[in-house]
Image (cartoon, coloured by chain):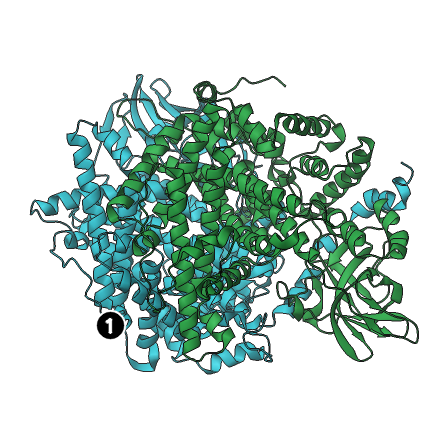
Amino acid sequence: AFAMSVNADLRRERAAATFQPELLTHILDGGAERTRRRKEIEALVLNDPDFQHEDLNFLSRSQRYEEAIRKSSLMVMKLREHGIADPEEIFWFKSFVHRGRPEPLDLHLGMFLPTLLTQATPEQQDRFFMPAWNLEIIGTYAQTEMGHGTHLRGLETTATYDPATQEFILNSPTVTSIKWWPGGLGKTSNHAIVLAQLYTQGQCKGLHAFIVPIRQLGTHEPLPGITVGDIGPKFGYDEMDNGYLKMDNFRIPRENMLMKYAQVEPDGTYVKPVSDKLTYGTMVFIRSIIVGDSARSLSRACTIAIRYSAVRHQSELKPGEPEPQILDYQTQQYKLFPLLATAYAFHFVGAYIKDTYHRISGDINEGDLSELPELHALTAGLKAFTSWTANAGIEECRMACGGHGYSRCSGIPDIYVTFTPSCTYEGENTVMMLQTARFLVKSYTQVSSGQQVTGTVSYLNDLSRQRIQPQHVAARAVSVRINDPASLVEAYKARAAWLVEAAAKNLQAELNHRRSKEDAWNRTSVDLVRASEAHCHYVVVKLFTAKLSEISNAAVRAVLTNLCLLYALFGISRNTGDFLQAGILTSAQTTQVNQHVKELLAVIRPNAVALVDSFDFHDVHLGSVLGRYDGNVYENMFEWAKKSPLNKTEVHASFHKHLKPMQAKL
Amino acid sequence: SVNPDLASERQTASFCVEKLTALLDGGAEQTRIRRAVVEAIQSDPVFSRENQYFQTQNERYEAAVMKAVHLQKKMHEMGWTENGPEYKYIYRALSGDVAFLLHRVFMRSISVLGSDKQIAKWIPLATQHQLIGSYAQTELGHGTYLQGLETTAVFDITTQEFILNTPKISAMKWWPGDMGRSATHTVVFAQLYIHGKCYGIHPFIVQIRSLQDHSLCPGITAGDIGPKMNFEHIDNGYLMLKNVRVPRDNMLSKFCEVRPDGTYVRQGSQKINYFTMTTVRISLISDEVLTPLMKACTIAIRYSAVRRQSKLKPGEQEAKILDYQTQQEKLLPQLAAVYAFHFINDYLQELFNRGYREIQRKNFDMLPELHALSSGFKAVITHHCTAAVEICLRACGGHGYSLLSGLPSLYTKILASCIYEGENTILLLQTARFLIKCFMAASTGQPVPPSVTYLAAEKPGKCPAKNKLDFLHPDIYTEAYQHVAVRLISSTATKLQDLIQSGVKKYDAWNQCTVQLVQAAKAHCHYITVKNFAETVETLETKAGIQRIMKHLCDLFALHGIFSNTGAFLHDGYISAAQMDMVTASYLDLLAVIRKDAVPLVDAFDFTDESLNSALGSYDGQVYQRLYEWAQKSPTNKMSPAYERYLKPLLHNTLSKL
């Protein structure tokens, strides 16, 4: 192999940047030292021949699963060899090994082990934790059923206590109660933590967790009474054996119920758990990961689309001149740069939530958990807001790459299919938005009854309390300066306040029509989702703006300020109706906003490639021929295509089987 | 048996489903023919799609070739011909899962671009499948911008041949269907050089594989371009040419000819050819764009009537998710869009038929308008429907993500339509160019084509609606759409002129206005769609409840468009802030009204379960049983070597030794 030089267009782009990309990388990583350590861990994986393999796009699903299992086994051993134990460093190592894709041990490492730690008694930890740590036991977490996902109380699996044998009898009483979707359940795991409705002494005590062995140790065959398998092909997640589990009168000892909190005594007496705010904490933590994932996935897609747009030349801008880079077209900039700004915005939001979470729960015993309910409500909405936006943004990046974006070699199809389920898992997005809305309406009601609210909703305190008539009233007049991020934060605040008030009033109007609470809520839910979205949008603009003042390097601050302005102004231009209807902006101002967005596109254009370089994705991790750092796109597309399964033989088998006989007959 | 939750939806239909199906088909007789074709195809096991979701790329390709071959036999058996009434339903019945589609494009390009002699030579060979054709236009480095293609064809006067070459990597042909593995011949588009002078892009018939053993011909490098988001059954290919010689007669020469002495002669008008290209954009709307969205709506709406989740009223059964306002707000506007685009497609077909008759009489006056409409509507409809299918997919939660739902493949297939036959942004800019030109003409009192006469008409400056019911009058919302279209087109025209007058170069000014131009073109198409929907509703029969339900859908389509784009309507105060609240209220009220007919409205699309190929969308609503049965057939449930090779050593204490 010979080293190809960097494509001339990309070289020019990089030379023209007004700031040093490494400095921005350090900010994204949380410091120069962390960047260094990340790259060190990255190198451990990249230089390890055990982790090399052919492009997964050429393999069948069964082969991809097998390859993932191979790497996961090695990964667990090598993590210990290298002495990597810090959770974030494990996360880095794992995502380099699996190149951002899910893997069959995800639920073992991410759910089974942590659940044992937090919900198992010391006796249970003795029995299960070390074997699980050493992977004699591989477990998963079986919650979702075929008929129930987000609405947990509706789960149908039963665990009935039999005091005679001191066992629980587990059953999947209906088709809809079959456990469906848990990762690693289909083929990999030999144990599962199963969530089931507990019945004892003839009463249902609600959902509880049970450790259930599902496959024979040694042969890996399913145990009698257990039906388990893979749920079949999906949009993505080819490496993951998402599974089903059906249990027929399957008995487990009483001691297999996770009993750190609730307990069933030998005679069947049920002991209630002490209520526990910390489950909020787990949810906040997982959502902060999804927000970070939104940022990362969108950053990857932007990296690919922007580098490719700097390499691809097409058509003409000026008659008689060479074909321009497609990145020079205004329409292309308008597609990509707002997404680039969004990716940065979401990075800072993700980091903020994580920091806040760590601050609050820093020392669980002494930590002040009073902020947790608000953070819980806020992160529900932010999870939905960022994952929806990133989901659509990844697709826009792919579209912006034209036909080649559609090829698997672009890498964007993979990013999309891997990311898109996050709109559904850990709480379906619309349901999440409505959770945030419930908190917003509650806060609004407190304000209307004369109480003050604090935190991100404190802007509701400014709403005039006299306005009790049901119609909308124009929002508080804001004199918006469209060049000033701080002033734009105020505009977003006013929009959120206006939409929260509108939704709350519509809800009240429905209640005044003597509808039931649930009915009124349902009939207002479109308004409520809009209010939540506006609230989240405000929070994102606010956090991005706040981040600017923390940046010491002037060149980096300047470029991020432009991105922040673009993010805020583009959001206005996409939602001008709200700002106009609420009276926050005049028509003349919205015209100026649109104009300023276009000016910012031109301002950001020279730094576009440097801004994606700053995300610092290694080519192997990016997995894209179009997005290669060196920009040698076409040569490598050809190299890639030659490896396609259809090209394995010069003449395809179907010529002899079908084509030739047909030609002979006709 | 039918799931009672779905059965109950069907008992309360406000209209006659069979009548609506006939309306969509263009008459009861058409429905009969379509069903007969579907029945004949789907009862034949060779055409089964049962295992489609479990197959590898190689298996999908092989199945598609097998089906294409079998189809020849089937057509013969059934007495179907290419000109018969059944022909157009075959593709729908196969759900497009068949090879050799480019073979037809190959034949069409010879028929349109070839001389009579060339047609007489090649078409019979192609018809009898003595050769398999493809169509090689797009290159690695060039797609939409045809003038930029880099493949060369140099005329060699001594041997009376063209020498074809791929001078650099970006000139390699890339993407043509059927070319990777199947085709023996292809039409190659290349820059023609005679005596060192370039004459631009011309089509050449090139043999690429042996007719004996299918091996590649000398000088040819060809193969499959690798996995894509969909179309695994098609061998999209690459092609590299190295000093490949073809006889002078292989240049398709209806319009341009190279004489033996190297003289280049242009003959006749290419306008008819141009018209053919334009027609392709319209012809793909029905099968490639509307059908997938209809299927997606069918799956998502039936599933939403079966899926129950959470409670709307305490103490009651869990509610159907279709009863949630947010779910209705996701799905019902997509359903309305299907009907809106179905009717605009009828309108465009009609217009193109008329255009074709005019062009045959050598009257080319309609061409610019037809071109503008086909570009704009291709872009708007493919974009809207692609987004709509994705909404349907995500509205089905986790199960939508399973390939067995059918939704991922519908999505990945429809989204290719945003790119092929012209990239959407570029097409919208072409429409915009036409609109700006017409606007300038109209403002100086010159005549303009019928679809844009509204640009000249004087209109009131404020929406007259007084309450939310007023927004259910088609006049009210159609005028609002018209107002926005005129405003966006005229303000962009003004901006362009201002820039040019201030000394900015014309091309620069154009680039600086392209974001606005795209918005203007979209607004124009949106207006025409709403107007056409409202006018069509007027003509429908009032019996059997058809007109009433179509009126609701028309209202919903129009109000959804305003609700999702409030800024454009509020901008100059045409609709006031208070009126916008009325729009929202009317829009949300309509959701509850159409909700009652949602399942019958998708039943009317009349897809068989085999066509839908979805565990979630079947007519009987037995969602969970089917999902469970299908999953068990997955190849991943056969014993995997992963256990013996990796899991077993892992589970057997490899680690505890560490």
User: In the rendered image of this protein, which colour is used for chain A?
Assistant: green
Relative height, residue B473 to residue A140 (above, below)? below
Quadrant of image for the C terminus of chain B: top right
Of residues A507 and B522, the one nearer the viewer is A507
Q: How many labels does the image show?
A: 1
Query: Looking at the rendering, which quadrant does residue B655 occupy?
Result: top right
Name the residue located 34 percent from the left edge and 65 percent from the top edge.
Answer: B584
Q: Name the residue under label 1.
A: B539
Residue at x 40% of width, y 40% of height: A486
Q: Which image quarter holds the N terminus of chain B?
A: bottom right
Instruction: Tell me where residue A197 appears, x and y as whole percent.
Output: 74, 70
Furthest-left residue in this view: B445
Q: Which chain is cyan?
A: B
Residue B269 shows up from this direction: yes
Where residue B56 appears, x then y in whole percent?
63, 48
Do we see residue B331 in this rendering?
A: no
Q: Provide the chain ID for the residue under circle 1.
A: B
> In the rendering, at what x and y percent does residue A399 appear?
44, 42
- Left or right for B57, reference B28: right
Q: Please tell me whether residue A78 is drawn above or below residue A193 in the rendered image.
A: above
